[in-house]
Structure formats: C-alpha cells, structure tokens
Image (tube, rainbow, N blue to C red):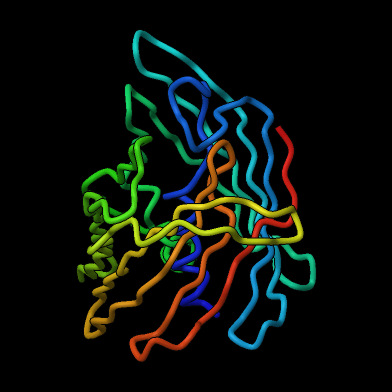
C-alpha cells in the first residue's frame, strides 16, 4: 500500500488542478475548487481518501500561480499527511515544482532532519494527443543524519499519451486521455521501476490512476469520487 500511495502522490501532483481556465485546458484553476479521491488496494479494498482544494490563485503578467492544499486520510478516518503544493501555468504549459514529487512517506520518515532537494520540474501541455511523448521529470533528495548522507532519486520517465477512452467513476463518466509513465525510484540499495497510467479529463484533471509492479500486476487504483468547482 505504501508503494501505491507514493505513486499516487506523484500522480496527483502531476494531474493537479491549478488556476485560470484560459491558461490550463485540462485543470480548473479556480479558487475554492475541491476534489476527493478514494484509494483502493490491489484487492479492491478502500484504503482511505485524498482531498484536494485550490486555496489561492494569483496572476502576474503571463503566469498564473496557484496553491493546492492536500490531505490524505486513512481507512479509519485518521489524517496521515497534510501539505500544500504550488503550480504555475504559462502559455500552453502547466509546470509543477519538482519538490512536489517527494512522497509524503519521506517527509514523515525524515521529519526534523536536514534535507537538500534538487530536480527538474514536471510539465504537462494543454495540447495532448495520442502518441505524444512528454518530458521526463525528476527529484533528488539528500538527507543528512548522524554524519551520514542518504540519497534518494525519483524519475518519471517514458511518459507518453497512450490512448483516449471513456472512464466511469462514482463522480460520473468522462472522456479521457490516458498517460503512461514509469516511476523509477533509487534509495540506498533499492532500485525499482513501477509503471502507472493516469486518466485525464478536460476541465477536471485526474479521473483515475492505476499503478503496477514490475511484473505488470496492479498495486492499487485511485478514482475521483466527487468534485466541485
């Protein structure tokens, strides 16, 4: 479940909803817009929900910036993580700060320690089309602890628009582009790659996400259960 939540966190950041509808075709960048997702494990059992809300929108020149508040709640209703992320929309592109790719579990594990973060921002254009290749993104984290440095890198690679299809969730039925990517993680002696697919709908953002293990078996699914704009 932890692996799925890590991938889900990355995917939600990639698919988040920023501001100024004229700037972002796929994501309603509207202050106050809210979205709720339900997370399921590989057996289809609910593992909790994730709540997203656009809390602030600012426009300066040709750039629009927004803040998204995120709250993860487990299956017992207990809050397990809460944070804010920032986004920028300029021209034909939504750009997400590379720091937003850091999994919530890492913040919890290394809370109070010195962290040095660097990377490449995640980009998602407005003009999606089947077969389109998308730019990679990555983040590197160095944690200093007791005179030792622990390095972790997360790379989103082989990103492409795979197909277009309709998908249904408790929130409704949506026409979506399906984006495939591989989430490559390196931490200490661990080196693993997890494929994932995300379903995007115009004007809303992420509708569904599914992650897989290295053998192609589902690790978990996340679906949009309700939203308001």
Q: Position of residue 84 (x, y in %)?
A: 53, 41
Q: Residue lying farthest right?
A: 76
Q: Nearer the viewer, residue 162 or 14?
A: 162
Q: Is residue 52 visible?
A: yes
Give the residue drawn at x 25%, y 67%.
152
97 left or right of 71 in image: left
Q: Position of residue 162 (x, y in %)?
A: 35, 62
Give the residue drawn at x 65%, y 75%.
40
Q: Is residue 111 visible?
A: no
Give the residue drawn at x 36%, y 91%.
215
Q: Quadrant of residue 115?
A: bottom left
Q: For the C terminus, which image quadrant?
A: top right
Q: Nearer the viewer, residue 142 or 12?
A: 12
Q: For the N terminus, which image quadrant?
A: bottom right
Q: Position of residue 135 (x, y in %)?
A: 22, 49
Q: Residue lying farthest bottom?
A: 215
Q: Position of residue 16 (x, y in %)?
A: 50, 44
6 left or right of 33 in image: left
Q: Quadrant of residue 136?
A: bottom left
Q: Residue lying farthest top?
A: 61
Q: Nearer the viewer, residue 181 or 51?
A: 181
Relative to residue 106, is residue 88 depicted above or below? above
What count of labels does the image hold?
A: 0
Give the residue drawn at x 58%, y 72%.
221
């Amino acid at each position: 479940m932890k692996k799925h939540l890590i991938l889900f966190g990355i995917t939600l950041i990639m698919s988040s909803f920023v501001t100024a509808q004229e700037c972002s075709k796929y994501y309603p960048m509207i202050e106050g817009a809210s979205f709720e997702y339900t997370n399921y494990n590989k057996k289809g059992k609910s593992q909790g929900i994730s709540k997203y809300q656009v809390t602030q929108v600012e426009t300066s020149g040709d750039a629009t910036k927004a803040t998204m508040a995120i709250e993860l709640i487990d299956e017992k209703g207990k809050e397990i993580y809460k944070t804010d992320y920032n986004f920028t929309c300029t021209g034909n592109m939504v750009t997400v700060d590379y720091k937003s790719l850091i999994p919530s579990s890492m913040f919890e594990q290394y809370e109070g320690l010195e962290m040095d973060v660097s990377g490449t921002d995640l980009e998602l254009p407005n003009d999606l089309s089947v077969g389109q290749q998308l730019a990679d993104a990555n983040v590197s984290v160095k944690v200093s602890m007791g005179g030792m440095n622990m390095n972790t890198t997360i790379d989103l690679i082989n990103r492409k628009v795979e197909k277009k299809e309709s998908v249904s969730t408790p929130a409704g039925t949506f026409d979506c582009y399906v984006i495939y990517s591989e989430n490559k993680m390196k931490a200490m002696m661990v080196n693993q790659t997890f494929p994932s697919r995300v379903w995007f709908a115009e004007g809303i953002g992420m509708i569904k996400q599914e992650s897989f293990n290295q053998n192609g078996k589902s690790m978990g699914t996340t679906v949009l259960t309700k939203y308001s704009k």
